[in-house]
Image (tube, rainbow, N blue to C red):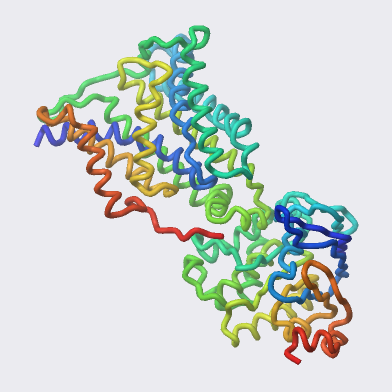
């Protein structure tokens, strides 16, 4: 479904990604793990067109999408829940969700998806008319995911959904990610520092270090890999 | 009391014009974070557009008819919308990824370019031209005051335009997209918003409002000339800052406050020479105590 070949991204003189390649097939949950600054977020940002790639190719459903504008990439069914959530704090919860459906014209369908989002995250329904800036961190993360779902993506990229969130909500959010993948048949690419949880729910994983893929395998093999264990799973 | 009411009506009319112009500054600031100094020249071009269209409108719809005036204003607004969009496309868009200071200086350059090109005798010429009477003008006697019908019309038109603008920004899809872009451009583009299109739309609306303001201002002035936009433009910019730059109701409020301050200070004979001094001193005081402007909220810089 998604294929990334030899992707290189440069910020000024600094190379953030040194030619990484990865592949995500329909229906999978794939995770990128690695420490802070390894280039995981940059990879997602290049896929969704937020940063330009200096070299390499990205194809989605067989079509090249390298260096298209973000709004054109969204149109093809890729949604990106960015690092730091980037919700519109000045808009209400409902307006945020409507923004997620910006490219859709079917108002009945939009209402249905909104019902689905509210069913998935009941907390959002309670806060529907509230300005999003007043939500807690966990609620904002739910809103960011809900907003991405509003566009009915085929492919969802999640950047650090557990960051800065109460542990009890982390569990819920990871359960919801699995549920979205299974029930909505949405393929997921997950970037996480919490390697434990990420490898628990994913099918396959890539380990990224200083802008390179150093290892990739089935998640259950990665969980028992001594190198991964010592570096990312706390021994 | 009569004096007070008289000044109030005058101030309201002047303030409404400032408000219309200030909205353009604040809208552009909202999405692009720079001050479009060429905005005051779009206002001037609006007045000139009306100057050239008015005779044609008068011959079709009859002199000083309300419908004719409406058509003149609409045409001028459309022309200015196109001009504003063109300025953005040619001068600002190529600099989108450059530091804001570059764009700001470019805006000053565009402003000077328009002003002095228009002063050339092959364009408009530097001399003041009498602005045609677009509307049947009447002085009412209301109690003890004389009220000019145009002075009543100006706030009325402004309120209507404010309502339309409020509706667009709050209730329509493109308006929500504008607010989203203004909050976080990247996040908006991740929703599928074509940010360039939103910016074009913002310039079109802001410039159309400037055209209307330019015509209303010209109706109150002795005549029009290529530098006529500088004074109201500067004041409207200050009004936008006073209201809280980037904040739409703030721009409207700032315009009204500045217009009223100026008119009241000018209305006291012994102080009339100091009217700008007084108005701006009060302004400085307000900003000293509320640096974000009347309705502005302190924003933490996003990284």
Residue in the foreground of this view, choosing between B189 and A199:
A199
Relative image position of residue A28 (x, y in whole percent): 84, 74
The residue that appears at 16% across and 28% down in the rendered structure is: B272
Q: Nearer the viewer, residue B176 or A216?
A: A216
Is residue A74 visible in this depiction of the protein?
no
Left/right placement of residue B5 relative to residue A137 reads: left
Q: Is residue B120 left or right of residue A169?
A: left
- Name the quadrant of the N terminus of chain B: top left
**On the picture, is A60 further left or further right than B133?**
right
> Can you say which quadrant of the picture contains the C terminus of chain B?
bottom right
Instruction: Establish if B205 lies above or below A165.
Output: above
Does A107 appear above or below B95? below
Tell me the quarter of the picture where residue B12 sits.
top left
* Residue B3 location, quadrant: top left
Q: Residue furthest bottom?
A: A235
Residue B51: image location, x then y, percent: 44, 15
In the displayed structure, A76 sits above or below A181; it is above
Picture residue at 31% right of the left edge, 35% below the top: B155
Residue B100, given in percent of the width and then of the height, sits at 54, 43
* Residue A139 coordinates in the image, percent (x, y): 56, 75
Q: Residue furthest top?
A: B121
Q: Is residue B261 visible?
A: yes
- View extreme (front): residue: A13
Residue drawn 33% across and 35% down? B16
Position of B40 relative to B287 (above/below): above
Q: From the viewer's perspective, tell me whether residue A89 is left or right of residue B7.
A: right
Q: Nearer the viewer, residue B249 or B88?
A: B88
Q: Which of the 4 quarters of the picture holds residue A57?
A: bottom right
Q: How many marks?
A: 0
């Amino acid at each position: 479904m998604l294929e990334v070949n030899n992707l290189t991204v440069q910020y000024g003189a600094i190379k953030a990604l040194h030619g990484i390649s990865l592949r995500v097939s329909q229906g999978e949950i794939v995770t990128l793990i690695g420490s802070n600054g390894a280039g995981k977020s940059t990879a997602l940002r290049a896929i969704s067109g937020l940063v330009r790639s200096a070299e390499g190719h990205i194809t989605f459903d067989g079509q090249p999408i390298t260096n298209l504008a973000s709004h054109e990439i969204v149109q093809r069914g890729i949604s990106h829940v960015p690092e730091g959530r980037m919700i519109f704090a000045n808009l209400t919860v409902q307006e945020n969700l409507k923004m997620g459906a910006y490219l859709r014209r079917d108002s009945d369908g939009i209402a249905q998806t909104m019902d689905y989002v509210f069913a998935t995250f009941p907390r959002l329904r309670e806060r529907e008319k509230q300005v999003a800036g007043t939500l807690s961190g966990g609620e904002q993360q739910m809103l960011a995911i809900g907003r991405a779902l509003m566009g009915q993506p085929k492919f969802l990229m999640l950047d650090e959904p557990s960051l800065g969130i109460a542990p009890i909500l982390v569990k819920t959010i990871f359960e919801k990610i699995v549920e979205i993948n299974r029930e909505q048949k949405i393929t997921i690419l997950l970037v996480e520092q919490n390697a434990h949880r990420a490898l628990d729910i994913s099918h396959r994983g890539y380990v990224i270090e200083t802008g390179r893929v150093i290892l990739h395998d089935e998640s259950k093999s990665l969980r028992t890999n001594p190198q991964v264990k010592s570096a990312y799973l706390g021994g | 009391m009569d004096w007070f009411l008289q000044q109030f009506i005058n101030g309201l009319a002047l303030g409404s014009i400032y408000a219309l112009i200030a909205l353009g500054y604040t809208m552009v600031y909202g999405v692009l974070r720079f001050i479009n100094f060429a905005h005051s020249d779009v206002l001037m071009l609006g007045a000139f557009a009306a100057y050239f269209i008015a005779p044609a409108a008068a011959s079709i719809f009859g002199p000083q008819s309300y419908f004719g005036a409406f058509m003149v204003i609409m045409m001028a607004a459309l022309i200015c919308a196109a001009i504003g969009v063109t300025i953005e496309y040619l001068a600002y868009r190529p600099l989108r990824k450059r530091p804001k200071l570059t764009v700001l200086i470019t805006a000053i350059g565009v402003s000077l370019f328009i002003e002095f090109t228009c002063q050339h005798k092959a364009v408009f010429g530097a001399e003041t031209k009498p602005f045609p009477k677009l509307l049947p003008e009447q002085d009412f006697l209301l109690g003890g005051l004389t009220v000019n019908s145009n002075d009543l019309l100006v706030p009325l038109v402004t309120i209507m335009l404010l309502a339309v603008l409020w509706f667009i920004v709050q209730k329509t899809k493109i308006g929500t997209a504008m607010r989203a872009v203004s909050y976080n451009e990247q996040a908006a583009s991740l929703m599928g918003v074509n940010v360039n299109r939103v910016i074009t739309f913002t310039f079109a609306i802001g410039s159309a409002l400037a055209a209307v303001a330019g015509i209303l201002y010209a109706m109150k002035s002795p005549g029009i000339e290529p530098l006529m936009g500088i004074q109201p433009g500067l004041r409207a910019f200050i009004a936008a800052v006073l209201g809280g730059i980037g904040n739409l109701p703030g721009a409207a409020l700032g315009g009204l406050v500045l217009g009223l301050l100026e008119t009241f200070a000018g209305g006291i004979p012994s102080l009339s020479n100091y009217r700008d001094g007084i108005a701006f001193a009060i302004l400085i005081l307000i900003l000293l105590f509320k640096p974000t402007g009347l309705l502005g909220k302190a924003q933490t810089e996003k990284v």
